[in-house]
Each structure stands twice: as structure tokens, then as C-alpha cells.
């Protein structure tokens, strides 16, 4: 039995079902972003380190869970459209409409790349499926990019949990730092883009003058 560390339901699920349980938890995490993959995946890695779960099975099932949850959110966006999806999200606890709007802008700016890269950014990694569905991104491309991005994210955290052993929950601290660095980098990239655009417009006006 894995030692109880305050996440009893998750520990019980993985103790009972093994790798499929981890996959089920990750599918639920995609549908309910407040459930943190940053806890689910390292715990699965800890179970791998204890010999309670095979590494390849853990990676396969958690990636399958990621894709399944992503497809469900893609379907929500495709079936309901933007206005109804946002209206429903506004009524849900712990779901921020502002986060959805940020994710929409990210998708429109980066297109298909946003699905791959978004799988490795906290919050965005779940919500990116919604604008992809709304915009009716080709399903084969969505599945391939989701699978690749999710596999990378899942492998990093499962392996980190295996390496940290009983200290697997420390991964969440690193994720907080990582998330802040990514958001800062994204903000700086937007500012740089705007500065270049403004500079070019200024040069164009001077030439016409």
C-alpha cells in the first residue's frame, strides 16, 4: 500500500487499478482542470519505483487518459460552439472564463502548434482542447499533436516521481516555478511582438511622409 499523503482518493485509485487507474485520473484531470496532473503523474512514478506498476504501462495509460479527456473537451467545443461553452464554464466552480479566453488567444496566435505546446503548460494543457474543437481543427492532427505533447509531459512527471521516491510531492514546487517562468516568457514574447509591430508601423509612416 502506498503511504497516504493527503491525496487518499488518488492513492486508493492507483492502489486498486494500477496503471489504468492513473489513466482514468488523468482523463478526469483533463475534464476537471482543478485535478492536478502534477500530483497524479509523480504518484504513478512513485508506484513504478516501488515495483507496483510497469513504467511502459504507466506511460501508455496516462497518455491514453490524456487523449481521451482532450477528445471529450474537443467534442464539447465542437458541439456547443464558443458562446454556449463559455456560458457553461462561467457557471462551473474553479473554472475561470479568463483562462479560457487566454487559451483562445493562444490558439488563434499559434494555430496547430498551440495544441502540441499547450500540453506542456499548466492550465492551458487542459483548456486548449476547447478552442481546437470550436475552430474544428482537423481531428487526426489534433489527436497526433495531443498524443505527442501529452506523452512528453507525462513522461517527465512519471520519471520525476520515480526518481524522487517518497518525496514525489516535491514535484509540485518545481511546477509552480516552471509555470511562472513560462508565463513570464510568454508575456515577454507578446511585448516583443508588439514592439516590433509598432516599430515597423512607425518606419512605414516615416517613409510615406
Image (spheres, rainbow, N blue to C red):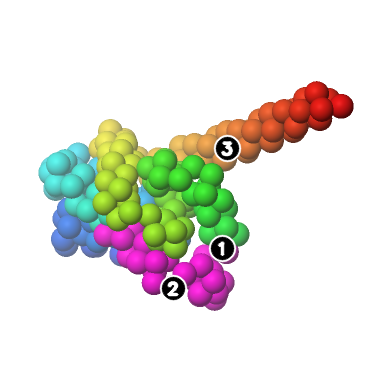
Q: Is residue 195 visible?
A: no
What residue is drawn where x is 33% and y is 54%?
Answer: 138
Residue 110 against residue 142 in the figure, above or below: above
Q: Secondary structure at mark 3?
A: helix
Residue 23 against residue 193 in the figure, above or below: below
Q: Name the N-terminal-most of marks 3 and 1.
A: 1
Q: Nearer the viewer, residue 20 or 16?
A: 20
Q: Position of residue 81 (x, y in %)?
A: 47, 69
Label 2 sits on residue: 80
Label 1 sits on residue: 96
Q: Which residues are magenta?
A: 68-97
Q: Name the N-terminal-most of marks 2 and 1.
A: 2
Q: Quadrant of residue 198?
A: top right
Looking at the image, which residue sits at the far right?
A: 209
Q: Position of residue 130 (x, y in %)?
A: 43, 60
Label disc, if present, on residue 186 of the rendered structure: 3
Q: CA distance from mark 3 to mark 2?
A: 29 Å
Left/right of residue 11 with respect to residue 53 in the rendered view: right
Left/right of residue 140 with respect to residue 117 in the rendered view: left
Q: CA distance from mark 3 to mark 1?
A: 19 Å
User: In front: mark 3 or mark 2?
Assistant: 2
Q: Position of residue 141 (x, y in %)?
A: 30, 48
Q: Position of residue 64 (x, y in %)?
A: 22, 53
Q: Name the N-terminal-most of marks 3 and 2.
A: 2
Left/right of residue 61 with respect to residue 40 in the rendered view: left
How crowded pointer 3 is (Cα within 10 Å; few <14, some 14-19, many 20+) is rated as: few
Q: Secondary structure at mark 1?
A: loop
Q: Nearer the viewer, residue 137 or 4?
A: 137
What residue is drawn where x is 39% and y is 66%?
Answer: 78
Could you tell me if the residues under marks 3 and 2 are in contact, i.e. CB atoms within 8 Å? Answer: no
Q: Nearer the viewer, residue 98 or 113?
A: 113
Could you tell me if the residues under marks 3 and 1 are in contact, i.e. CB atoms within 8 Å? Answer: no
Amino acid at each position: 500500500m502506498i503511504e497516504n499523503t493527503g491525496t487518499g482518493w488518488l492513492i486508493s485509485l492507483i492502489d486498486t487499478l494500477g496503471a489504468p487507474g492513473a489513466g482514468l485520473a488523468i482523463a478526469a484531470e483533463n475534464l476537471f482542470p482543478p485535478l492536478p496532473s502534477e500530483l497524479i503523474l509523480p504518484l504513478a512514478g512513485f508506484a513504478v519505483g516501488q515495483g507496483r506498476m510497469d513504467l511502459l504501462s504507466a506511460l501508455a495509460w496516462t497518455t491514453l487518459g490524456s487523449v481521451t479527456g482532450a477528445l471529450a473537451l474537443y467534442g464539447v467545443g465542437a458541439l456547443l460552439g464558443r458562446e454556449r461553452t463559455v456560458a457553461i464554464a462561467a457557471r462551473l466552480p474553479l473554472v475561470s472564463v479568463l483562462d479560457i479566453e487566454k487559451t483562445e488567444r493562444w490558439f488563434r496566435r499559434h494555430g496547430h502548434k498551440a495544441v502540441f505546446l499547450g500540453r506542456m503548460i499548466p492550465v492551458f494543457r487542459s483548456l486548449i482542447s476547447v478552442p481546437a474543437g470550436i475552430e474544428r481543427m482537423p481531428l487526426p492532427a489534433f489527436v497526433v499533436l495531443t498524443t505527442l505533447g501529452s506523452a512528453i509531459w507525462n513522461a517527465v512527471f512519471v520519471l520525476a516521481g520515480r526518481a524522487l521516491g517518497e518525496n514525489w510531492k516535491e514535484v509540485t514546487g518545481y511546477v509552480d516555478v516552471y509555470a511562472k517562468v513560462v508565463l513570464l516568457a510568454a508575456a515577454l514574447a507578446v511585448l516583443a511582438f508588439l514592439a516590433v509591430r509598432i516599430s515597423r508601423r512607425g518606419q512605414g509612416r516615416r517613409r510615406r511622409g
